[in-house]
Structures are given as structure tokens and as C-alpha cells.
Image (cartoon, grey):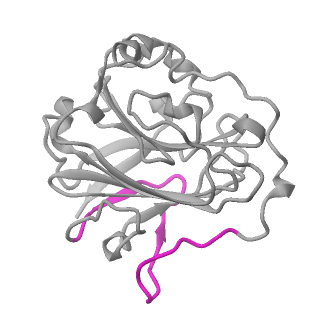
Amino acid sequence: MRTGVLWLWAAAIAAGVPAGAGCRKKAEPPPEPAATRPAREPSEPTRQAEPVRREYWQRGKTYLCRRARGNISIDSQGPPGQWAHAVVVRDFLIPVTGMTVTSTTDARMLWDDEHLYLYFFARDRDIRGKFTKPTDPLWEEDSIDWFFKPRANKPFYYQVQVNALGAVSAWEIAARRSGAGRQLAELQPPVRSAVNVLGTLNDDRDRDTYYRGVIAVPWKLMKLIGGRAPKAGETWTFNVCRSDYSGPAGLTVEEQAAAKLTTQDYHHYEEYVPLKFVE
């Protein structure tokens, strides 16, 4: 997957990442058939006893990234009440084929004047994770990937990736195929993350349930947008993706994307989804 990112090798090598970063051969054995899916998916836990209203993003519509109401907790205990008004992305597809995915994912986004907040809940029968540093090849195991393209007429964009252990990689990419990238996760103020796992890592002999987490990315790190939060009403494009590994030795992988990609490249921003920052 991400066969279009060979150009990023130079920047990745400079950051201490091996030259295979962002590019993956098709894994063997082939993905398990959908018939092996559990009959029921686990519901997302919540701290609140009362029902939580959920609004779901609809394909073909603009995602409304709402302003956070109060402080966002960066911990692994599940979403507090302020995430209740965040629009949920659940409609993921397999790139190129457009087929329905096997393991479902919920993703949400919020913002304030200091941070962009990202939340995910990934249902997963076989959770895989061993990497702990931002320069590790997180794409080689279970991970969630966000991409943001702030300006239609500018080549730069952002990538934020997290694995089941809470390791975060955050890139400011000056231009696709340019080899120019800046690893934000090694800078200050820090990119913060917290992830919780319900299951046993790297053991395909049992059935896991989910991993979930939250990330806070400081606007100050995003120099190419001026290091400031966007204004309400500003429109970007984005994609949120997932790599779901399973099976013996974690060799089976299912790639997922919210955007309907016609290429096996998460960086293909021409097909990203509109996102609007709102109050």
C-alpha cells in the first residue's frame, strides 16, 4: 500500500526510518473471508451512563469538524462528553475495489485554538503492535492514518499516524514526491496521544476486541499554515485510513480509507474528502 510514496524515502531516511517506509508489498496469505466476521460488533464504550447522540458523516458530504467544548482529555479511558457532538466517520472502503471492510472503525475530529484533536475506535479481532517511536515503520502493523490538505493551490499536506501502542508519527510534507518532510512528533510542543487496547497484542490464538485512542496535534507545529489554528468556515480536504493486520505472524492486511480511492496510495489527495472547521 502507499506505492506512491517512494519519493518520501529521503526524508524518512534522514529521520532514521528505513528505506521501505510507506511502501508495502501485498501480504500473504490472502485476507480471510468475510464469513469469519463476528456476528455482532462490540459497541463503543463510553464514560457516560446517558445515551450519547451520534451524527455520522455521509459519503459525498463535507465533514464538519466542530470546535471542542471545554478541555479534551488525552487519556485512554474512552471519550468524555465533549466528543459527543463530534461527527463520526464510519464509512470506510477498501481502496480501488470499493469493497466493504471487514473490521469497522469510528473516527472523530475536533479543534480549538491550540490543537487539532483526533479520536478513533478500531474494532479488531487480532491486534498487532510492537513499535514505540515516531521513526518506526508504524505502517507495518495495525495503525490509523490521517491526512490533511489545507490548501488546494499549495502542494503541502500533513500526515498523522498512530499504532495500537500509542506511538505517533506526524509529518509536515512540503510536496508530494519531493522527498521533503518534517517529523513533527519529535518537536515541541509535543504531539500527545493515549491508546487503550482490549485484547492480547500479537497473539492470533485468541480473539481481541478493539483498540481506541486520542491524539492532540498542536497548530504551532504546522509552520506551513502559519502555526495558527484555522478560522471557522475554512475548508480543507482530508482522509482517514486504517491498516488492519491479522492471521499467523500478522501477515494478512486489509487496507481501508474513508475517501473512495481509485489508487493504492493513501497520499492521493486529489480524492480526499472536504472538511470544514465550524464552531
Q: Is residue 67 left or right of residue 80?
A: left
Q: Is residue 120 left or right of residue 126?
A: left
As drawn, which residue projects farthest toward the bottom? 50
Question: What x and y, as percent, mark residue 143?
Answer: 53, 42
Q: Total of numbered circles in the picture?
A: 0
Looking at the rendering, which quadrant does residue 16 occupy? top left
Residue at image x 50%, y 28%? 137
Q: Is residue 204 above or below residue 262?
A: below
Which secondary structure dominates the residues rendered in magenta? loop
**Residue 111 versus residue 237: which sits nearer the camera?**
111
Verify whether residue 68 appears in magenta.
Answer: yes
Q: Is residue 191 above or below residue 91?
A: above
Query: The N terminus is located in which quarter?
Result: top right
Residue at image x 32%, y 32%? 152
Residue at image x 38%, y 41%? 237
Question: What x and y, as percent, mark residue 5?
Answer: 50, 19
Looking at the rendering, which quadrant does residue 162 occupy? top left
Mark yes or no: residue 151 visible.
yes
Question: What x and y, as percent, mark residue 57?
Answer: 49, 61
Q: Is residue 136 above or below residue 215?
A: above
Verify whether residue 210 appears in magenta.
Answer: no
Q: Is residue 182 above or below residue 180?
A: below
Magenta region, residue range: 41-69
Residue at image x 42%, y 47%? 166
